[in-house]
Image: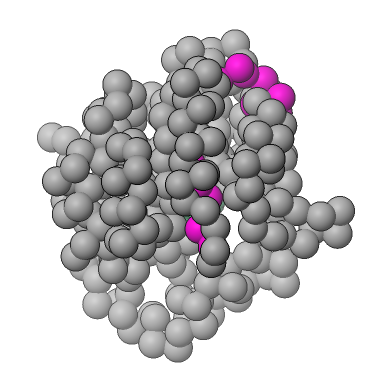
Amino acid sequence: MIYNFLGNSDMNVSKLGYGSWALGKTGWKNVNQDEAIKTFEKSIELGINFIDTAPIYGFGKSEMIIGDITKSIRKNLYIASKTGLEWSDTGRVIHNLSRDFILSDIEKSLKRLKTDYIDLYQIHWPYEGFNLKEVLNTLNELKKNKIIKYIGVSNFKINLLKNAYDIIPICSIQNQFNILQNNDINDIIPFCTNKNIGFIAYSPLAQGLLSGCFDKNYTLSKNDIRRFNPLFHNKNIYNEINKIEKPILQTSINYLLNNNVSVILISMTKEKHLIENINILNKKKV
Ligand SMILES: NC(=O)c1ccc[n+]([C@@H]2O[C@H](COP(=O)([O-])OP(=O)(O)OC[C@H]3O[C@@H](n4cnc5c(N)ncnc54)[C@H](OP(=O)(O)O)[C@@H]3O)[C@@H](O)[C@H]2O)c1
C-alpha cells in the first residue's frame, strides 16, 4: 500500500481509501451486506487506513457498521465523516449547516462510530445562502475541543474553496474526480497542490462505469442511486469509455495517481474488487 500525508496534516493516509456509502446499503440495493462487511474488514487487514463515511449513508447505518468494526483498533485508523445533510422519517433529505444542527449531528456520529473523536470532519455539500464563516467557526471550535482533528470540505467549487481557505487553512477537499468528470484538473487541483491541501477523489471509477465491467446492455435496478447520475443516461458514454486505453480499470486508477490526488476513495463491496484495486496501486509503485 502507498501512504502519503493528507495536505498539511500529520495523517499518513493510504492512497486507496475505503468509501463506505454502499456499506450503508441505501441506494445500493444489490449490495450483499455480509460480503460488504467482510470486504471492509479485509481492506483494513490489507493496509487501508483511511475510511470515509457520512451520516446520510444508509441513514446512519454506514457509520454504525464502521463503529462496530473499528472500535477495538480505532487509534490505527483515520475516520472521515461529514455534516450538512439531514433526513426525515420518510427519508426526505434536506441541507442544513446551521450551528445547532452541526453540533447535534456530530454527537450522533460519535455515538454511531463508537469513538470520542473524528479525524477529518467535512462539510458535505454547500448550498445557496449558507453561512461559510459561521460553519467554519463552529468546526474550528470542535477542533479546539479535540472532538475533531482536521476540517475538510466537499463539493466546493474553486471560489468557495478559496473563501474557505482565507478563513481557515482547511486540511482537504473531497470532490468528484475521474477520467470522465475531471473539471477540477484546471483549478482546484493546482490550488490544492500550491497550498498543500489534500485532494480526495470521490467516484474515481465513475460509480463503476470505469471498472471495465459495464457494457451497453447493463441495466440499473429500480432503487439504484446511479439512476440520478447523468453519466448513466449519456447515450455516448460507452463510445467515450471505449476510447480509454485498456484495461480501463488500470488506466482509470493510474490517471488519478498521475494527477496529484491524495486519496482515491473507492467503494468496494466485493473482495475481488478490493484485491484488484490494491494490485493496480502496487504495480504503479514498482
Ligand atoms: N462527498 C460526496 O458528496 C460523495 C459523493 C459520492 C461518493 N462519495 C464517497 O466516495 C466513495 C466512492 O464513490 P462512489 O461509490 O460514488 O463510486 P466509485 O467508487 O467510483 O464506484 C463504486 C462502484 O465501483 C465498483 N468497483 C470498485 N472496484 C471495482 C473493480 N476492481 N472492478 C469492478 N468494479 C469495481 C463497486 O462495485 P462493488 O460494490 O461490487 O465492489 C461499485 O459498484 C463513496 O463510497 C463515498 O465514500 C462522496
* Count of numbered labels shown in the rendering: 0
Q: Position of residue 263 (x, y in %)?
A: 33, 41
Viewer-proximal residue among 244 and 167 = 167
Q: Is residue 94 visible?
A: yes
Q: Is residue 137 left or right of residue 184?
A: right
Tell me if residue 183 is in the magenta stretch. Answer: no
Over which residues does the magenta segment extend?
Answer: 111-127
- What residue is drawn where x is 19% and y is 42%? 195
Q: Position of residue 236 (x, y in %)?
A: 39, 87
Q: Residue furthest right?
A: 89
Viewer-proximal residue among 6 and 136 = 136
Q: Position of residue 147 (x, y in %)?
A: 55, 21
- What residue is drawn where x is 25% and y is 57%? 188
Tell me if residue 125 is in the magenta stretch. Answer: yes
Q: Where 248 falls versus 167 (above or below)?
A: below
Viewer-proximal residue among 217 and 192 = 192
Tell me the quarter of the image containing the N terminus: top left
Q: Is residue 43 visible?
A: no
Tell me the quarter of the image containing the C terminus: top left
- What residue is drawn where x is 46% and y is 31%? 140
Q: Where 67 falls versus 174 (above or below)?
A: above
- What residue is drawn where x is 66% and y is 65%? 224
Q: Is residue 166 left or right of residue 89?
A: left
Q: Is residue 155 left or right of residue 169?
A: right
Q: Position of residue 121 (x, y in %)?
A: 49, 35
